[in-house]
Amino acid sequence: MGLIEKIVDNKTFQWFIIGVILANAAILGLMTMELTPATHHLLEVLDNACLVIFCIEIAMKLLVRRMAFFKDGWNVFDLIVVGIALAPATGELAVLRALRVLRLMRLASAIPSMRRVINGMFAAIPGGGSVAAVLFVMYYVAAIMGTNFFGKTVPAHFGDLGTTFFTLFKMMTLEGWPDIASDVLEHHPRAWIFFVIFIVFTTFTTLNLLFGIIVDAMEQAKEADARTKMAEQGVEMSEESNEMRLAKIEDDVKHIRTLLTHMVDDKAAHRPAAGE
């Protein structure tokens, strides 16, 4: 068990798994091309070999971590992804074969920097949800106003609520908004006020606020990861310090035992022999 734990925690083994994931990505990409049957069969064999390596890795982690394995969400994600790949690709389950590309997402669990980014994005959901709610309210108000103001004159962009929502989305992404504005301004010269207010509040204010929340959450995730590493290093240093203390105590005990032995021997050597 100790050997397996050393292998699982070894950096070389972790980089090997990353290499297998990247190789699997290349294999899955090549399998989308038009290939000869022999080449396709070879790629299938290589893909199955990658899957076997992933299964061995998961099994090793389960042996070492046991129930602690399931406390890490990334381990559970890896287990689900590999489990999907093991499902029989026949009948109604044939669609699961296309999901084997999810194995490439294991890069996120294997590379700490990617893991921090995704953890930060998930951590930003609570704060981002409030911003998204405000953005939706602004969208809804602007959509109703746009449909009422410009629906009859510019139906191609504001004919109904759904069309207006799509138009506002294009405006928020700054994709073709000058053309939309030009079509509207031909009929409503003062409509520029509507466009300026909407773009400023959605693109330059609300979205930047949302991005700020995500960046802040990523920074917090990075700091938490750094604190965890420092704690682990502290535990390791503490263990090393304890080992050094124990070693010193053992040396001192041996030294004292040696001195006592010499003292006893000296006394025995200088003690008068019986009958003298």
Image (cartoon, rainbow, N blue to C red):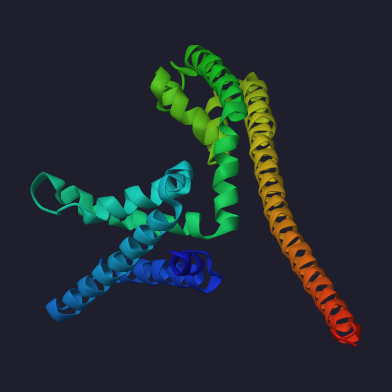
Q: Nearer the viewer, residue 58 or 204?
A: 58
Q: Which quadrant is home to the C terminus? A: bottom right
Vertical position of residue 185 compared to residue 254: above or below: above
* Residue situated furthest front in the rendering: 275
**Residue occupying the point 54% across, 60% down:** 111
Q: Relative to residue 87, is residue 182 depicted above or below?
A: above
Instruction: Tell whether 168 sits left or right of 239.
Output: left
In the rendered image, which quarter is residue 121 located in? Answer: top right
- x, y percentage for residue 42? 20, 78
Q: Pinpoint residue 270: horizontal percent, then vertical percent.
A: 91, 85
Q: Residue furthest left?
A: 91
Location of residue 254 (image quadrant): bottom right
Instruction: Between residue 251 and residue 63, name the one nearer to us.
Output: 251
Observer-nearest residue: 270 or 192? 270
- Quarter of the N terminus within the rendering: bottom left
Is residue 105 found left or right of 37 in the rendered image? Answer: right
When the figure is inspected, residue 193 is found, relative to residue 53, above or below; the finding is above
Does 241 sit left or right of 186 as displayed? right
Tell me where residue 16 appears, x and y as whole percent: 46, 73
Residue 26 position in % (x across, y down): 36, 71
In this rendering, does residue 170 appear at all?
yes
Q: Is residue 7 above or below residue 93?
A: below
* Residue at 22% from the left image edge and 55% from the top image edge: 86
